Amino acid sequence: MAQTLRKYKYSSLPDNDTSIRLLTLCRGSFPAEICILLHTTKIEDKATHQFEALSYVWGSADLAENVVVKTWGEEDSHLSVTRNLAEALRYLRHEDCNRVLWIDQICINQEDLVERSTQVKYMAAIYSGARQVLVWLGPEADDSSLALQTLEMLSSKIEVEFETQTVKCARDHPSEEHWADPQIALPFSKQQWVSICALMFRSWFERLWIWQEVRLAQKAILSCGYHQISWEALKKSLACLSAKTYPLYLQDRGYYSRRAHIDDLCDSRTIDFIHAVQDTRVAKCTDPRDRIYALLSISLDGNSQFQPDYTKTVPETYRDFFAEEVRRTERLILLRDCEAYKREYELPSWVPDWSKPRRSFLLSAGLAASHTKADVVSLGQKMMTVTGVFLSSVKQISISNIQADSDDHDISLNLRRLVQGLTPPGFWRTNPKQSELLCSALCAGDFADCYHPVMKGRPRLGESVEALPDLLGVGKNHVGTSPQKPSVSALINCMRLCLPGRALIEIEAPVGDPNLLLGLGPSCAAQGDIIAVLLGCSAPIVLRPSIDETYQVVGEAYVHGVMNGELLLGALDKGVELIWKRDKDGLLSPTFLDRRTATITAEDPRLSSTALPPGWSKELDEFGLPWFWHDDSDEGTECDPRIGKEALLSRGVNLRTFTLV
């Protein structure tokens, strides 16, 4: 058949155009040869929006099959596709009518790098414009039909408010309440649980590009063999699974970590790029450049000028993206993604190596540099000079051996060793303030009290201080030998997120200051490193000085007492706290709570009496957050002009430059 046919030759798509190819999958029985037609259309042509877009796993190119390409007035030709795709086409093909599809492997000439770069730019419009997205999970196996039936049934029993992750019963009846009660286990058999776990481990869930493909879809249907479930039904059922306990026999199957990964995939709220990278850290892609390209449409706004370009090398792609993000956001947020471990590519230390997953989770939100604009003195191929404030030097470190999957007893044992590595031993028992300092460092300040409304599942600071002796083996209830209080469990879970890949860092205190300065930094930090707060970066950054007065970026840090902009604006008044408020879309924004008056404002009270510079005005957006506008610009900014470089110098802030290499 196809072996005797000539290879299909793609015609070039028009330059500077929004043209795409669509394929018509010709009708046929399951075993019949696969025949397709290709035609060109424009994205904006509404008539083309009756097509369906396929989301699937390519599979190995070494396992290939040929499909027949029919062209009017010409002899048939053939295209080679992966066996995974050929299998999907057989299942998706109708016997009685043709089907119009967009499939990247066929509709993009993969051998033309320029075309690939252009077409990748259109993929967001393709997947959002398709009538529906077809997700192919593979043929039926491992009781997949039972898994889909169970999840479909579960979704019919509940309703979910995805913004708050609240699960409710679909029917207001006492006999149905158990479906939404997190304290009552789901009435599933072992066979059902194991089939659901196996379904979650289908390789489709590991792909990076699916984050764009299903999040942008108007409607998505998942197919496993001939059985299907809607994406919305899957999201509902997984929200319920996340709220419930699960059988212990699933622990060794990796159920928890895989479900957590899929939970992030199902969370369709808009996020910034750095958090999109964290959420997709275990997702897979063949081309390291796709670590950037696959996330552009779900994490960046329309102001970005960065475009996919497969003619660039990986280092060029990462460096150019970093530079564009500094220009677009006027911030240095991406510095937080740097880790000074061995890198896959030769890059400046200030450009993250996104080809490798982080060794640690991103720290919780901070406001160390307030709403300042980055002051980038110069940005070249290998060096970047920025402005900031020197905090102190690292006096000593104590490296954490705690892992995300460590059990409670191991966490308690490792925590004791971790704290014993600091001096003086037992410092945290001298007074409550020192206990608060240690708890804050261990949890990177990520307490339930720091959010409005209070964040579920996070520990409270006061309860954490009380629970600390039990965790360190000097309390009445040793962890692992007696039932745990909820406060102890919450503290342990927080440490599972904060401590892997990190170290407690003791910081040189100013002369005459008897207090211990403590923080949390990357495990690769070392004695003699310095910590700086750079303008436009929300977290302090650990830097490694060189003899030529340049610095390497080591990684982000949490330092108690400087996370709320204290180095730039001074301490907040007593009774005033920085609180992260969740808006109607579930996004967190910094606000200030005055406990004396029980009022929350977006305005930093340290700046309330400071007038805006001439030519500037301030407006509140739909969420009540301040945006600043200049008379000479049509674009607003989150960066507060009252704390620009000159304004900070006039306040007496000791700014200096740091040349990063």
Image (cartoon, helix red, strand yellow):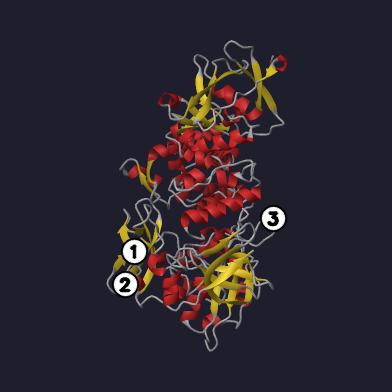
Left or right: residue 327 versus residue 407 is left
Disc 2 from disc 1: Cα separation: 15 Å
Name the residue carrying label 2.
595
In-front residue for pair 329/543: 329
Residue 161 in sight from this viewpoint = yes
In-front residue for pair 621/246: 621
Q: Residues at badges 2 and 1 in contact (C-beta under 8 Å)?
A: no
In-front residue for pair 191/40: 40
Q: Residue at x 48, y 73 (%)?
A: 562
Quarter location, residue 500 = bottom right
Which numbered disc covers residue 106?
A: none
Nearer mark to the viewer, of 2 and 3: 3
Name the residue carrying label 3.
346
Expressed as whole percent of the image width and height from the top left, the position of residue 514 reads 53, 87
- Amino acid type of the residue tagged 3 in the rendering: Glu
Expressed as whole percent of the image width and height from the top left, the position of residue 122 reads 50, 35
Disc 1 from disc 3: Cα separation: 42 Å
Expressed as whole percent of the image width and height from the top left, the position of residue 200 reads 56, 41
Name the residue carrying label 1.
602
Q: Secondary structure at mark 2?
A: loop
Q: Secondary structure at mark 1?
A: loop
**Which tag, 1 or 3, sits closer to the chain's start?**
3
**Which tag, 2 or 1, sits closer to the chain's start?**
2
Quarter location, residue 650 = bottom left
Expressed as whole percent of the image width and height from the top left, the position of residue 613 reads 35, 67
Q: Residue at x 30, y 43 (%)?
A: 172
Q: Secondary structure at mark 3?
A: loop
Q: Quadrant of the N terminus?
A: top right
**Which tag, 2 or 3, sits closer to the chain's start?**
3
